[in-house]
Amino acid sequence: MIKRDRYLDKLIRKKENGLVKVITGIRRCGKSYLLFEIYHQYLNQIGVDDAHIIELSLDDDMNIRYRNPLELGQYIRSLIVDKSNKYYVFLDEIQKVATIPNPYLPNSDETVGFVDVLLGLMKIKNVDLYVTGSNSKMLSSDILTEFRGRGDEIKVNPLSYSEFYHAYGNDKRHAWRDYFTYGGMPLILSYANHEDKSKYLKDLFDKIYIDDITSRHKVKDKGALDDILNILSSSVGSLTNAKKISDTFRSVSNYPISAETVNKYIDWFIDAFVLYRAQRYDVKGRKYIGSPMKYYFSDIGLRNARLNFRQQEENHIMENIIYNELRVRDFDIDVGIIVYNYRNNEGKSKRTQLEVDFVAAKADKKYYIQSALSIPDENKRNQETASLLRIDDSFKKIVVVKEDIIPWHDDNGILYIGIEDFLLDESSIDR
């Protein structure tokens, strides 16, 4: 059993808190496994018998009847027969439940959907309710309003490097190489060779993610959707925006597609948890800057497979992995910008920007993090730390390198640490 202790601990802390525990994340990242196997086993261990754990997978064709919200509510209630004990209700892929007209109000526009079912089940005092979903629109502001503050989200990611490393059954020396190439979708660990891993990852895109998006949004121009995804795959770690992508279509493919359409397509990938968007933040001005932004893949293996493993730029891949790790650790993450003025050799005043790869904040903690493959000499070190040295607050400044080094601090207090130490030991950034 792959350990997902971080998410199990969150479920345990939120157990019986009176809210709907909404478990979100990209499809096939392990949400169902977390709930139906890991959490189910935990409940058994503390004395809950199977008769009081109700499980229903709504993406199973055997259960298509319960995609009707009225059928779903009636079925779950029929299983709650013991009023003196708590029932734990697990509903997998809740977004599969349709929104239908209220049959009792035939002349009205009123509809009934999964939110109504969940709100109804919450009123049953001996029910503790858990649902999974793969579409972040499920937690958009309008639905949260309907929950009236009674929804509690738990975001599940593909395997972190630490989870992958400890589940890796081969020589641990190859763990980073395989994670760097194939990512952390849990089933990737069950495949032995490149051909099988590659096919699995490509099938996830073609048969699940792309199909989900095209069917949900009734996409007619699937080719443009594919092309936008390929462009974003190639530009991981680089600043881009919808207009730039639109211009690329016109210049390379002689194909007109508006920036608005590009933005819409990108949002769909973000909604499906395939992509994440990182905004730019002016560290000194303490304000957000608009376009361009950076986009990262929720799983680097999916990105690599999308490009047929041709573009293996270590610096961009490592940056994506660090970004994902910070998300796993529940940081809010921005791309930092340092704006400063200087005089050139001719004495003229100039204004320029330097970038901090990540500004990671959580509660009262903040870290400024640079991703660098290596620091072979003083010039490279000066290049990587130029932005960090212009930040005048006291929060931790870190440079993560690919090499396996003994962590050390320079004279300015900047921490240098190897990527595997950073990923395997969460406390390492506080050295």
Image (cartoon, rainbow, N blue to C red):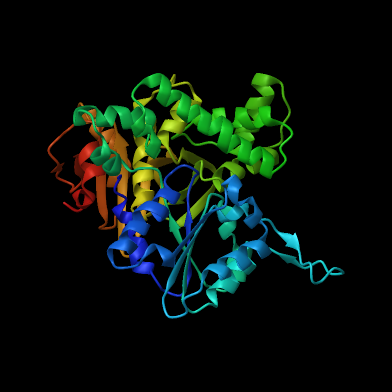
In the image, taking residue 137 as reference, residue 16 lies left or right, namely: left
Q: Is residue 152 visible?
A: yes
Q: Looking at the picture, how far across and down is residue 425, in whole percent? A: 21, 47
In the image, taking residue 102 as reference, residue 347 lies left or right, namely: left
Could you tell me which residue is drawn at 25 percent across and 58 percent down? 394
Could you tell me which residue is drawn at 38 percent across and 39 percent down? 186
Q: Looking at the picture, how far across and down is residue 76, in whole percent? A: 56, 66
In the image, taking residue 175 as reference, residue 312 lies left or right, namely: right
Could you tell me which residue is drawn at 57 percent across and 69 percent down? 78
Who is closer to the viewer here, 144 or 125?
Answer: 125
Quadrant location of the N terminus in the rendered image: top left
User: Is 248 situated above or below 347?
Assistant: above
Q: Can you name the residue that lies furthest to the right here?
A: 107
Who is closer to the viewer here, 67 or 116?
Answer: 67
Indicate the quadrant where residue 292 lies: top right
User: Is 24 situated above or below 121?
Assistant: above
Could you tell me which residue is drawn at 47 percent across and 71 percent down? 19
Q: Looking at the picture, how far across and down is residue 276, in whole percent? A: 49, 44
Who is closer to the viewer here, 112 or 302?
Answer: 112
Q: Looking at the picture, how far across and down is residue 392, in whole percent? A: 29, 55
Indicate the quadrant where residue 178 lies: top left
In the image, taking residue 80 as reference, residue 423 lies left or right, namely: left
